[in-house]
Structures are given as structure tokens and as C-alpha cells.
Amino acid sequence: MTQGIETEEIRRRAASLGEWFHNIDLGGVRTAPNHFLGDYPAVKWRQFAHVIPPDLAGRSVLDIGCNGGFYSIEMKRRGAARVLGIDSDEDYLAQARFAAEVTGQDIEFRCLSVYDLGAIGERFDIVLFMGVLYHLRHPLLALDLIHEHVAKDLLVFQSMQRGAASVLPVREDYDFWEQEQFDDPGWPKLHFIERRYSHDETNWWVPNRACTEAMLRSAGFAIEAHPEQEVYLCRRVEAPPGAAAAYPVRGRTA
Ligand SMILES: C[S@@+](CC[C@H](N)C(=O)[O-])C[C@H]1O[C@@H](n2cnc3c(N)ncnc32)[C@H](O)[C@@H]1O
């Protein structure tokens, strides 16, 4: 469905919205046909779509870092009653609004940082937090804020991962003089990028698998499925003692 907009008009308007990260099929017009990851994020979506309820009727969805709106549109296509997409970049939001218009999906998009989630004042049945963690200078804070302010039930999470895929079972405690565990490849590690990685100055922290899983648990998200190397389906549970976001809520409305 293209809401009656001519193909040439779609092509012209999509091009006028700058470079797209999301390759979305808008009535035959591909928005990022030369994406370095291929047909992205459709290739990723195909690997984990089956773990998300096929019928989202009556459910609410928050898509954090929604970019060009690919996942927001897919959630709406599954019948979600309400989808809110947020991103800190107005250019991407303009793309998302256009993609929703062309595909005929009623989605709200708002310019908001993950750090300001407290301003939304609402919890969502499903929160998508895909491909954002490693772009943040304060990744654990973001997870804490999602838990504290917006997650009601499911969290769909994705992060780039680097380092070992092994996971060292961690003990409850270690003596001050025990140090060898830190050099085990399966110890949770968050790699700091001081300069650039993948030619992108917005990459700050890249976890290994053990760290990804430990951070999710530590923020109060129980891992229920791991359908794809980078993707986790989690359920919000009570956060462990001591885990809490220490970031002020900036007002109640965005
Ligand atoms: C790699 S893209 C991922 C897009 C999409 N979620 C996906 O998985 O395909 C990262 C997105 O996060 C957004 N972003 C970066 N920092 C953010 C922040 N502090 N708050 C909200 N969005 C942010 C970027 O603007 C960009 O659209």
C-alpha cells in the first residue's frame, strides 16, 4: 500500500530526506539499497521475528532509537494498538514519518533521547531497544531507565557484540587477590572506543556476549530467548538490589 502516492513522488521525497540507514520498501522504492549490511534491517528481522507475538492487538510498543521506522512499521503491521517511535535525530524521524505515511501506518514519532524516557510517563507492553546500546556513552544507565520508566513486560534487545562468544559462569563473589577471571575471554567485558570503530564516532562501548547478558540481568531483564547472535527477548522482572537509575526525570511530558 502506498497511500496513492506515485512511485516517482516517493523516490523524490525519499531522496530529499537524506541518507537512509533503514532499507525500507516504499511501494517498490528501496530507501537504502546499497546498505553495507545488505537488506538491513530486514535480514536481521527475519532471524528473530518468530519470537515476537504474531498478533499484537491491544498491545502498546515503544521503539527506542527507531531510525527510519522499520521496526515500528512491522509492529503496527502485527496489529499493535499503539506504537511510539523515539529517536534523538530529527533527520531519521522525518524519514520514519514519511515511511509510515507511505505504508499507511498510524505511528507516533517523537524526538527524545533514551536518557529522557522518564518524560514519557507511560509503560509499554513491548519495548524495542535495538542497535542503540553501543552508541551510548552511558549504556547501563539507559537500561536502568528503560526498566524504571517504560518497560511493562517484554524487551526486545539488540547490540553489536565483539570479543568472545563464550560465557564464564560468574560466582557470587571473589576475593580481592583473585584476578585471573578478568583475563578469561568469557568474563563480561565492555570494550571502550575512544576514537572510532567502523568509521563511526558514535560507537562508544561494545560488549562481548557475557557482558550483554550480564547487563540485561543486572538491569532487571530476564533473558527468555536468544534467537539470533545479537538479539535477546527479555521479560521485565524486579531489578537486583542496588540497580537503579540515578538520572533525574526532566518533567513529566515530552
Ligand atoms: C544503529 S541505529 C539502530 C536503528 C534501529 N533501532 C535498528 O535496530 O535498525 C541507532 C539509532 O539510535 C539513535 N540514537 C542514538 N543515540 C540515541 C539516544 N541517546 N536516544 C535515542 N536514540 C538514539 C540513532 O539516531 C539511530 O537512529
Image: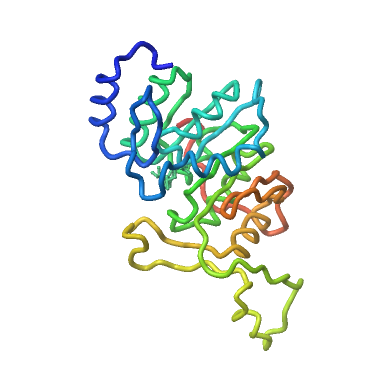
In the rendered image, which quarter is residue 60 located in? top right
**In the foreground, 191 or 110:** 191
Q: Is residue 97 visible?
A: no
- Residue beneath the point at 47% across and 32% down: 85
From the image, which quarter does the N terminus lie in?
A: top left
- Check the image and report above or below for 223 versus 175: above
Q: Quadrant of ligand 1?
A: top left
Give how far across and how far down residue 83 sits, in percent.
Answer: 53, 27
Q: How is the image coloured?
A: rainbow
**In the foreground, 101 or 236:** 101
User: In this view, which residue lies farthest toward the bottom?
Assistant: 177
Give how far across and how far down residue 148 sits, in percent.
Answer: 62, 44
User: In this view, which residue lies farthest toward the top?
Assistant: 4
In the rendered image, which quarter is residue 135 located in? bottom left
Q: Is residue 16 visible?
A: yes
- Check the image and report above or below for 99 versus 22: above
Q: Viewed as shown, does residue 3 lie left or right of 213?
A: left
Q: Viewed as shown, does residue 30 lie left or right of 58?
A: left
- Residue beneath the point at 54% across and 24% down: 76
User: In this view, which residue lies farthest toward the right?
Assistant: 172
- Residue beneath the point at 48% across and 36% down: 251
From the image, which quarter does the C terminus lie in?
A: top left
Give how far across and how far down residue 244 sits, in percent.
Answer: 63, 53
- Residue beneath the point at 45% across and 35% down: 86
Q: Viewed as shown, does residue 121 lie left or right of 109?
A: right
**In the foreground, 61 or 5:** 5
